Image (tube, grey):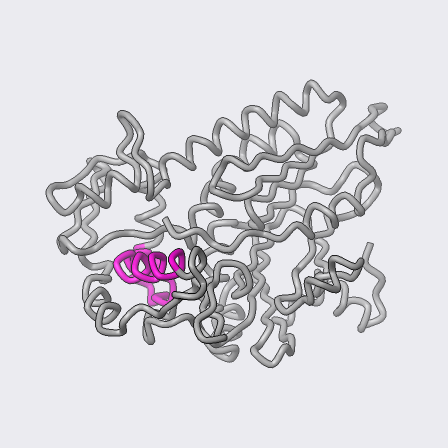
């Protein structure tokens, strides 16, 4: 599957600064003591997974962390587009067999595909997981350009246009009763990178909320904040990266943080043009492809979405990145519980009205104080 951009290392630094590692916080009302623990893992979804939570003991924290890892590994394998596994009809298997006959897939994969098709049928077509034929061409050229910059080249438009003829979600036939997927178009393939990490995060939330309510989980930047931290703060602080941060300045002690949002029981997901990209003739070409132009979208530098569902935020951050600001704002304002922050090509920042409840820059401008 195409992987969304990697969340930068600023998240770890921000969280480390925001929380005092290993300190114990007494909760008088419950007569308990809570400690903050952090774990990281780099083997899931080709990105860094960070888990922070408050528990009474490290043993209890590690028990929950172990279960979360186990569940995330399962989703990583089911959603994997590049590797097959014994006795598992994952995305890799599906893309190689579903044009021959209906393939019975795991429930989690069927549900993800079915949900994405519902979005397609509702008119949200800027994020189309049936664009695998086009995205695989861009992936091939991007990887070649990264590995050999002197020979970096753009895919021929003729190849992209030919592949775009095989991207209709109408060709994906789902049988809910049998949990099967069939490709009516033999040249179609699915790429679920725009929603996979968000879907996996949502899948482990019920367990986390029951086992360790005060937590923060980041899957390569798809961040979900649980109940408030047990250190007295009312919310978790999550950094939004400046998409044009001067990394030299950052290495000398500067910041790559555009803003900080304070959230609890919500997700924060950003799509941007600054990680998965390569350069051709001095021009940056990122991984978020506009289905209309078949080229990397130039509408935005980044889009951050806050809502309750990581899958929806994942999906919407890509969708809003491809739409104009006016179209995106209209979409967000028509959805309950969804807020967004856009960084436009000129570097200016626009926010949906409700973002003022979360973004510190807006709260400070209005005379608030964020915690």
Residue 127 belongs to magenta span: yes
The image position of residue 92, as x and y in percent, is 28, 41
Q: Where is residue 4 in the image (x, y as percent from the top left)?
A: 47, 54
* Magenta extent: 117-144
Between 7 and 231, the one lying in front of the other is 7
The answer to whether 201 appears left or right of 351 in the picture is left
Indicate whether residue 344 is drawn in magenta.
Answer: no
Q: Please, is residue 140 above or below residue 323 in the view?
A: above
Q: In this view, does 300 lie to the left or right of 341?
A: left
Q: Which of 283 and 348 is in front in this view?
A: 283
Residue 68: x and y, percent?
55, 30
Residue 118 seen in the current view = no
Residue 358 in the figure: left or right of residue 66:
right
Using the image as rendered, state which of residue 352 and residue 296 is in the foreground: 296
The main secondary structure of the magenta stretch is helix
In this rendering, position of residue 331 left or right of residue 268: left
Identify the residue shown where x is 34% and y is 54%: 116
Res 155 → quadrant: bottom left
Specify the farthest residue to the front.
150
Where's residue 120, x and y in %?
32, 61
Residue sitting at 42 percent across and 31 percent down? 74
Residue 58 vertical placement versus 233 (above, below) = above
The residue drawn where x is 38% and y is 58% is 144
Exactly how many numbered labels are in the figure?
0
């Amino acid at each position: 599957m195409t992987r969304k951009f990697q969340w930068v290392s600023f998240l770890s630094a921000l969280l480390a600064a925001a929380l005092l590692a290993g300190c114990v916080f007494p909760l008088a009302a419950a007569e308990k003591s809570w400690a903050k623990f952090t774990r990281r893992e780099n083997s899931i979804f080709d990105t860094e997974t960070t888990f922070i939570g408050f528990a009474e003991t490290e043993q209890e924290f590690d028990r929950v962390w172990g279960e979360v890892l186990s569940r995330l590994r399962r989703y990583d394998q089911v959603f994997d587009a590049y590797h097959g596994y014994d006795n598992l009809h994952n995305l890799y298997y599906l893309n190689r067999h579903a044009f021959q006959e209906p393939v019975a897939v795991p429930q989690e994969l069927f549900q993800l595909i079915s949900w994405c098709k519902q979005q397609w049928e509702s008119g949200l077509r800027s994020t189309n997981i049936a664009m695998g034929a086009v995205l695989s061409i861009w992936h091939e050229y991007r990887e070649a350009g990264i590995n050999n910059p002197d020979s970096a080249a753009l895919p021929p438009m003729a190849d992209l246009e030919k592949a775009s003829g095989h991207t209709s979600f109408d060709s994906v036939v789902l049988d809910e009763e049998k949990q099967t997927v069939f490709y009516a178009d033999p040249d179609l393939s699915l790429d679920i990178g725009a929603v996979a990490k968000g879907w996996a995060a949502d899948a482990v939330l019920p367990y986390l909320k029951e086992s360790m309510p005060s937590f923060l989980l980041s899957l390569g930047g798809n961040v979900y904040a649980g109940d408030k931290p047990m250190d007295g703060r009312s919310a978790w602080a999550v950094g939004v990266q400046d998409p044009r941060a001067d990394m030299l300045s950052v290495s000398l002690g500067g910041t790559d943080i555009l803003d900080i949002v304070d959230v609890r029981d919500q997700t924060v997901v950003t799509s941007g043009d600054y990680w998965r990209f390569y350069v051709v003739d001095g021009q940056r070409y990122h991984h978020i492809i506009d289905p209309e132009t078949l080229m990397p979208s130039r509408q935005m530098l980044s889009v951050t979405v806050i809502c309750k569902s990581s899958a929806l935020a994942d999906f919407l951050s890509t969708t809003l990145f491809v739409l104009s600001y006016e179209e995106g704002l209209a979409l967000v304002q028509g959805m309950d519980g969804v807020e967004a922050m856009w960084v436009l090509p000129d570097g200016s920042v626009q926010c949906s009205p409700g973002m003022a409840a979360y973004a510190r820059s807006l709260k400070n401008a209005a005379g608030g104080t964020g915690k």
